[in-house]
Image (cartoon, rainbow, N blue to C red):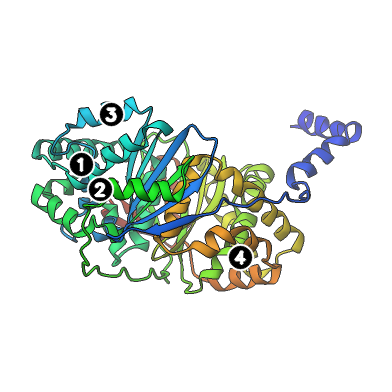
Amino acid sequence: MRRGLFLFVISILFFPGLNGQEKFRRLPPYPEPMKEWRLPSLESATLANGLTVAVVPRPHSPFLSLQLIITAGESESPENLPGLATLTAKLLSRGTLLLSGAEIEDKIEAMGGELNIITSFDRTLFSFRFLEDYLDDALSLLSQMILQPAFASAELDSVRRSLFYELLEKKENADFLAQRQLLRWLFQGHPYQQGLFNEDLLRRVSRRDVLSFYDRHYRPENSVLVLGGNVNLSQASRKVSHYLNTWKREEANHTSTPPLASKEERLIGFIDLPRAKEITLVMGNVLSSRLTNDIFPFLVLNQVFGGSPHSRLFMNLRETRQLAYIAFSEIEIFKSGWVFLVQAKLPPPALSAGLKEIERELNRLVQEKLPAAEIEQAKSFLIESFPLDLEPLEALTRRAAEVLAFHLEEDHWNRWVENVLNIEANRVTEVAARLLSVPLSVVIVGDSRQIGDFFQQVDQIKVYDRNGKLLYTISKGEEK
């Protein structure tokens, strides 16, 4: 111990530059003047059947990116049939009236292409990338999948089995378990809870259910198709209309999804993951705001708090106190609201101290005025990283599709940079005090044998299994 202390003193006396290096690690450099950058124009048109078509020009790209959003996700699945939206979407690439699933895969490969289908809480996305010369082939294939799906019973069984084992495998992942349990609390009583289904419920879905969901929700007026690359709106509209003109609109009485609401009760939950070497911690709540312009000051606030390795959370827990391997925060934006999440991975002995430091940093956001210099650093980071995030053609066209599908054109496309640039420190402080006044619930995943002391330190902790079932509750002073 004395030898270590002696060496530490020697290093300070004879290598003073080390202190400067530590200061450099704690303080990011002041931002350089930002280069002017603008998103390409987003041109759109509505076809006769109600389908919105848009293009994002990128003249020299050898690939085209096609993003089709159907504004129906798991929140539209009936209460007794969770997973229906996901199964329906996956089946569209498993066979049409004229093509088998294997033939669809061969055609995509021949285009130098890749197709991904993703179903979330409030949308289903078809992301299709292919070489520019194959635009007609890609649209022809897409039209067959959308307009002539076979929904074969054998394929339904295959997709259901595949999804079953996929979900089963994810239950070995601590991040998946922690975030899923937190969302179960936050989405309780809301249609979004349908998207948090367990694998055993998939057996309820029949072919008739799939056909019914498809007929109701897969409609052109419910959809947005965006093409990115060396293509113009006139060409795109003509070709999309040619291949999808028989996609009939049908004004269905879609139920509107209610807004998400913050939870007033702070819960602490635990999921046992034997032999886990680290603790995964997730905290969060719904941000209740009816003001769409609150999102921009909160993006800046999140960047100050935990949006990057230069943010307060990482610098405190990882660099200064060495309590965590990683620590960050993020905002999940849904059609019905926003969810603020804080995540960290810690060694088991650091759980109590790490949680206290996260809560201390959160309290600072609410109780202290944010320095203007820190706000400017955060704004600079967001604005400089924005074009980098959208550099991949798929990312750019996907953002365009989301902006159009949820009617966010002005603020989240043309004026995104301007909206961030104009945020002032007082506005960020005001939004922090208003939106972060709610408690953040906590989910911890790890090996229970390594954190026995923690159970004695909290007033109450709810213990769940990996399916989200409450096993028992431990109150302070009780033995686990």
For the residues labelled 3 and 2, the Cα–Cα distance comes to 23 Å
Find disc 4 in the rendering and name its residue.
Answer: 297
Spatial CA distance of label 2 from label 4 is 34 Å
Residue assigned mark 2: 86
- Which is closer to the viewer, label 1 or label 3? 3
Q: Which of marks 4 and 1 is nearer the N terminus?
A: 1
Please indicate, yes or no, whether residue 379 appears anywhere in the rendered image. yes
- Point out which mark residue 107 bears: 3
**Which mark is on residue 222?**
none
Residue 446 location, quadrant: top left
Specify the amino acid type for callout 1. Answer: Leu
Nearer the camera: disc 4 or disc 1 = 1
Residue 407 located left or right of residue 430 = left
Instruction: In this rendered view, identify the residue nearer to me: 341 or 247.
Output: 247
At a point 17% along the width and 49% down the height, the residue shown is 201
Which x, y percent locates residue 233?
44, 50
Q: How far apart are marks 4 and 3 (CA)?
A: 46 Å
Q: Which of 361 and 176 is in front in this view?
A: 176
